[in-house]
Amino acid sequence: MSTNVLSTSAAIGFGGVVQEYLWNWENQQLRVVYETLGKGSPLLLLPSFSSVSTRLEVGELAKLLAPNFQVVAIDWPGFGESSRPSLNYRPEIYQHFLEDFVKAIFNTPITVVAAGHAASYVLQLALKQAAFSKIVLLAPTWRGPLPTMGASQQIAGFVRELVRSPILGQALYKLNTTQSFLSLMYRRHVFTDAAKITPSFIEKKWHTTQQPGARFASAAFVTGNLDAVHEQSDFLGLVQSLTVPLMVVIGESSPPKSREEMNALVALPGVRSVVIPGSLGLHEEYPAVALEAVQDFLFSSEN
């Protein structure tokens, strides 16, 4: 496992130093791209899992944090500019990756700010070892879209294998990642200000979805195969066992089922929380508001 600096022309970032982390999984080497910006205490910034997942979704937040922190933002394996091989993407991959990456890049417990589905992985690692000193969860989720809609494991598994298939799968994936479909999803679940969902914005998201091998990790997420826990009680149990200070940021326009889960989380003793404008993409749509909501927590020495 090693890290290399990439030239600025080789990667599209948000102004930081772009590097690659070479990571081995089951005798296969994966290239994981990450970007570092700023100076100060280290802070790991994790984007959410989604069909359009990329570190650029936390890029504006990274720039706002950079005056006070050395921010490291990643493209998860299977997403963004990282390798997208046709693996059977499942929680074990991301659990091991996050543990290895944190161990390789940082030498002290760090602050972590994680969006969406990254929440469970952060909490699991926090319980396994002293990786983090503070945790901020932005619009945390633990259940993928199809299971949230009520699909059984059998149906979700069938859809996943269908999308993974060579010809039919490619066609189905393309139908579900058209620019019009992506725009619809953003309007329904991700952003609240339709004026921000411009054609150029959607085109960039669409471009991310059309990279070679993009459908494999995306299908795993959508069908719940990246769900690190499968019951609300298990997710809440992770938080109840936590000894690290935790703050949760909720979008006031979050989808009803997701909001119910977030409300159950912040009802637990010791969990700090705040509600701000936005939905599941609050960290991308309102980065300055998100930072303002958590900055006292981030800068306080007593949590």
Image (tube, rainbow, N blue to C red):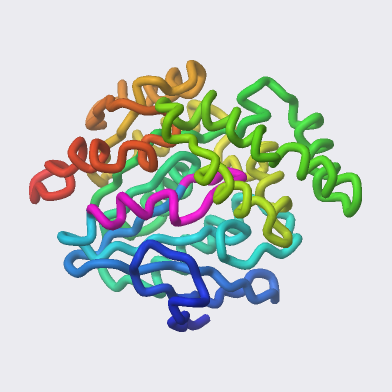
Residue in the picture at 23% in, 55% down: 65
Pick the front one: 68 or 261: 68
Image coordinates for residue 248, horizontal then vertical, percent: 30, 34
Residues drawn in magenta: 48-64
Image coordinates for residue 247, horizontal then vertical, percent: 26, 37
Q: Is residue 97 left or right of residue 73?
A: right
Residue in the picture at 41% in, 38% down: 238
Asked if 222 appears above or below 208 in the picture, the reply is above
Q: Is residue 9 left or right of residue 173?
A: left
Q: Residue furthest front?
A: 199
Label count reads 0
Image coordinates for residue 287, horizontal then vertical, percent: 30, 42
| Quadrant location of the C terminus in the rendered image | top left
Q: Is residue 212 left or right of residue 185?
A: right
Asked if 13 appears above or below 239 in the picture, the reply is below
Asked if 193 appears above or below 244 in the picture, the reply is above
Residue in the picture at 47% in, 49% down: 121
Pick the front one: 37 or 41: 37
Pick the front one: 62 or 179: 179
Asked if 254 appears above or below 93 in the picture, the reply is above
Residue 131 found in image quarter: bottom left
